[in-house]
Amino acid sequence: MALEEHLGDAGGAAEVTVDLERRVRVPEVGKGAFAEERLQQDEAAFAVFDTGPGVNFDAGARTQLAGLVTAAWVALAALFFTGALSPLPKAVLAAIIVVAVWQLIDFNHLRHTWRYDRGDGMAQGATIAGVLLFGIEPGLMIGGGLALLLFLYRTSRPHIAVLGRVAGTEHFRNVNRRTVETWPNLLFIRIDENLYFANVPRVEAELQRLVLAHPGTEHVILVLSGIGYIDTSSLEMLESLETALWEQRIQLHLAEIKGPVRDRLEGTELLHRLGTERVHISSQKALDAIVRGLPAVA
């Protein structure tokens, strides 16, 4: 198992660095280059012993041959040197491992993750703390569990924006970010997240709030450019929304549906109700179909 791990990781590392080294050492191709590379691999094997393929790579290993050399030294140590190594205090063995893996610890990456996304930083920090306090498997479970909870939290609170058209273009953007054109009887809404059971209640409540906040609305156009998946719960919510809006004399439209989403919606009651006249390839096409000749309100 250790040999296969070394072979796989050494092969991946080789893809990153071998080409660059060959460019630098083209004049050395031949016996001298091979001997130098073999010497580096032997030194890497002595340096890391069996502390892991990542350390092996950092020590100078560049090909899968380094994994074979490392495995050979491990086998020799297991067969002939266990007696000599057994009297060593555990502190000495621990120090060897700490020195070998210390270069793998990257606090800068942790700080970068924390600055960019606090949630990812929390998951990464929890994983490190869990491994140090409880062991590898419990630590990974803690980190994975926290990452899953954070994912559910983020996706259950999707960003929903009211859109307007940028003057002189066919681009629709967030009304809170740009100066755009709007229409008193039209409401363009974009949902920037896949729709699934965890965010259905919040999305439905937000859509209802936006409709109530824009009295006089006759057409609600859902821009689905940010949606790559709609599950069964979300489909039922959209069907209920279409029915509720229809009862208030408001028509629901869909625009910019991605191909895979459109394929899943084919044959559903929702598309049957909307028909081709309320499903549009773009926001501009929806606007053209609904309000031909209606002046915009900046």
Image (cartoon, rainbow, N blue to C red):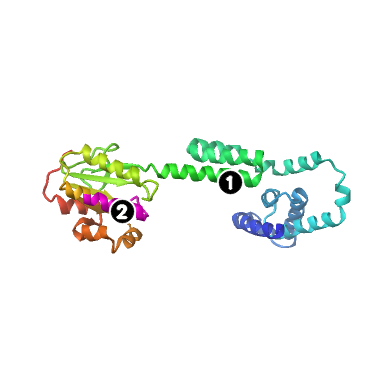
Counting from the top left corner in percent of width and height, residue 166 is at 24, 43
Residue holding disc 2: 236
Please determine whether, in this image, residue 116 is positioned above or below residue 17: above
Residue at 17% x, 49% y is 247
Q: Is residue 30 left or right of residue 247?
A: right
Whether residue 100 can be seen here? yes
Is residue 44 in the magenta section?
no
Magenta segment boundaries in residue numbering: 225-243
Residue shown at 20%/39% (left/top)?
214
191 on left or right of 52 = left
Badge 1 crowding class, 10 Å Cα cut-off, few under 14, some 14 to 19, many 20 or more, is some
Asked whether residue 35 is in view, the answer is no
The numbered disc on residue 187 is none
| Mark 2 neighbour class, 10 Å CA radius: few under 14, some 14 to 19, many 20 or more | some
**Position of 73 compared to 125: left or right?**
right
Give the residue at x 21% y 58%.
273
Amino acid of disc 1: Met
Indicate whether residue 240 is drawn in magenta.
yes
Count of numbered badges drawn on the protein: 2
Which residue reaches farthest bottom?
A: 267
Dot 1 or dot 2: first in sequence order is: 1
Locate the C terminus by quadrant: top left
Q: Position of residue 79 (x, y in %)?
A: 85, 57
What residue do we see at 69% from left, 48% from top? 55
Mark 1 vs mark 2, CA separation in Å: 34 Å
Q: Which residue is mark 1?
A: 141
Task: Please state the horizontal and vertical placement of residue 180, each as a whole percent of the image.
Answer: 23, 40
At label 2, the amino acid type is Glu
Q: Secondary structure at mark 2?
A: helix
Q: Position of residue 285 (x, y in %)?
A: 21, 54
The quadrant the N terminus occupies is bottom right
